Amino acid sequence: MKTPADIITRLQLMSQDGTKSDRRLANLVLSDLDFASKAAISDIAARVSVSEPTVTRFCRNLGCEGLRDFKFYLAQAIAIGGQDLSPEPLSRDAREQRIASAITEAAVSAIQRASENLDMTTLVDVAARLAASGNVLCIGSGGISSMMATEMQNRLFRLGLSVLAQIDGQLQRMYAAVATPDTTVVAFSVSGYARSVIEAVQVAQQYGAATVAVTAPDSALAKVADTVIQLQPFEDGNIYKPTSSRYALLAIVDMIVTSVAETRGPKVLENLRRIKQSVNTLKVDDPRLPLGD
């Protein structure tokens, strides 16, 4: 029998489109996951006034062999995404302040943790390598890491470096395959288990490229890269807001880029001047505005 890919989604669909008894059973499970994952078949049947064979048929309609198989997949879903299944309702009192505080405090905390655990000697060495590289390839996959790869490109080209960001998995491998010993690959992965990123690093190493990973310590990516700038992600349990890890990762990107700029010295100033001149002719000529942002 086909394995349920997502038992919660199947239950949600069943609660809307199933038979009358199936809808009642699905709604029971979704409203009381703990009970459904532990109760005997007789208790489940009694709760919604159906027969035990109806419960068994319900489980089979979900793609399970029976109640035991159903409970296995339900327990798995609860373990993986339990906090997302039964979130605490938000209070409406002082909601605006709570949102502002939740975001800003978590961002500050994430940046402070990243800074405290950062090996600045390694970071400065990486910056020196980047400053001397013939070309730089920045790679990342997923929401946060792909943004950081693109941001690294955005910051380094201003400093006169030949830099390219790739977030497509196949293109990452293709560009890695034309790397040279003069190439530095900077790979971003919050988890350290993005397969396309890991494989691209390994391909680039075959052709002599230096590889740097900004990732979780002891992860799969950390184990294959030549140099690792460690980022230990930490989530605060607030399921409503985006992860604060991206603020920490962005801070690390800014540290690397600042170190690269200082390493390259005054020769970066002409590029920055040109960019400022070019962009400011298209908008308000205000020297206080960010450079090209």
Image (cartoon, rainbow, N blue to C red):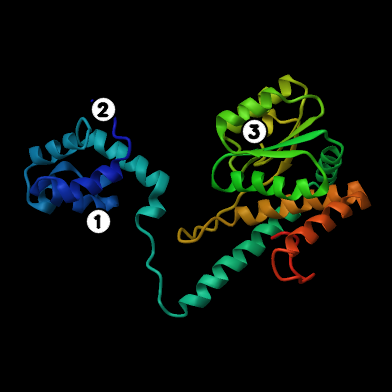
Callout 1 amino acid = Ser
Mark 1, residue position: 31
Of badges 1 and 3, the one in the foreground is: 3
Residue 114, given in percent of the width and then of the height, sits at 70, 53
Marks 1/3: CA distance?
40 Å
Which of 260/165 is in front? 165
Give the mark nearest the N terminus, 3 or 2.
Answer: 2
Residue 46, given in percent of the width and then of the height, sits at 10, 50
Marks 1/2: CA distance?
25 Å
Callout 2 amino acid = Lys
Residue at disc 2, secondary structure: loop
**Number of other residues with Cα within 10 Å of mark 1, as a class: few under 14, some 14 to 19, many 20 or more:** few
Q: Is residue 55 left or right of residue 216?
A: left
Give the mark nearest the N terminus, 1 or 2.
Answer: 2
Q: Is residue 255 in view from this perspective?
A: yes
Residue 23, given in percent of the width and then of the height, sits at 14, 49
Which of 271/1 is in front? 271
Q: Going by the picture, which residue comes out furthest to the top? A: 206
Give the mark nearest the N terminus, 1 or 3.
Answer: 1
Compared to residue 112, the image places residue 14 above or below, namely above
Mark 2, residue position: 2
Mark 3, residue position: 221
Callout 3 amino acid = Leu
Marks 3/2: CA distance?
33 Å
Residue, x 50% and y 58% (percent of image)?
237
